[in-house]
Amino acid sequence: MSKNKPSLPSDCAFVVQLRGDAAVAQGDFRGRVEHLVSMQATHFESLEELIGFIVRVMSARQTDDD
């Protein structure tokens, strides 16, 4: 791995912000997620919604690359 290159591609970077009252240990995932390159963002109320957003964004990016 080169010191000048990031180890992970930036077009796959997301920021996940959990709500302060989310009880993650109990499976309560609520918050906001943003794809850093496209700036697409959404609020989520479950882990399934969070993963669904990431899958949609990444699928669309792969389609755009074809």
Image (cartoon, helix red, strand yellow):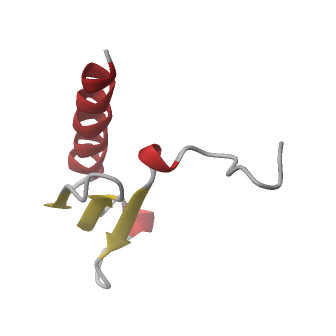
Q: Quadrant of residue 3?
A: bottom right
The residue that appears at 34% across and 54% down in the rendered structure is: 37
Q: Say which residue appears at 31% left-offset and 43% top-offset.
A: 54
Closer to the camera, 5 or 14?
5
In this picture, residue 48 sits left or right of residue 43: right
Quadrant of the snapshot with the N terminus? top right
Residue drawn at the location 45% of the way across and 52% of the way down:
13
Q: As rendered, which of 18 and 12 lies closer to the eye?
A: 12
Q: Residue at x 29, y 34 (%)?
A: 55
Q: Position of residue 62 (x, y in %)?
A: 33, 24
Q: Is residue 15 visible from the viewing direction of this image?
A: yes
Considering only vertical position in the picture, is 49 above or below 21?
above
User: In this figure, what is the number of numbered marks?
Assistant: 0
Q: Report the side of 23 relative to 63 (left or right).
A: right
In the displayed structure, 5 sits above or below 34; it is: above
Instruction: Work out which residue is located at the far front of the displayed protein and give it.
Output: 4
* Direction bottom: furthest residue: 20
Looking at the picture, how far across and down is residue 64, in whole percent?
A: 25, 25
Q: Is residue 44 visible?
A: no
Image quarter of residue 22:
bottom left
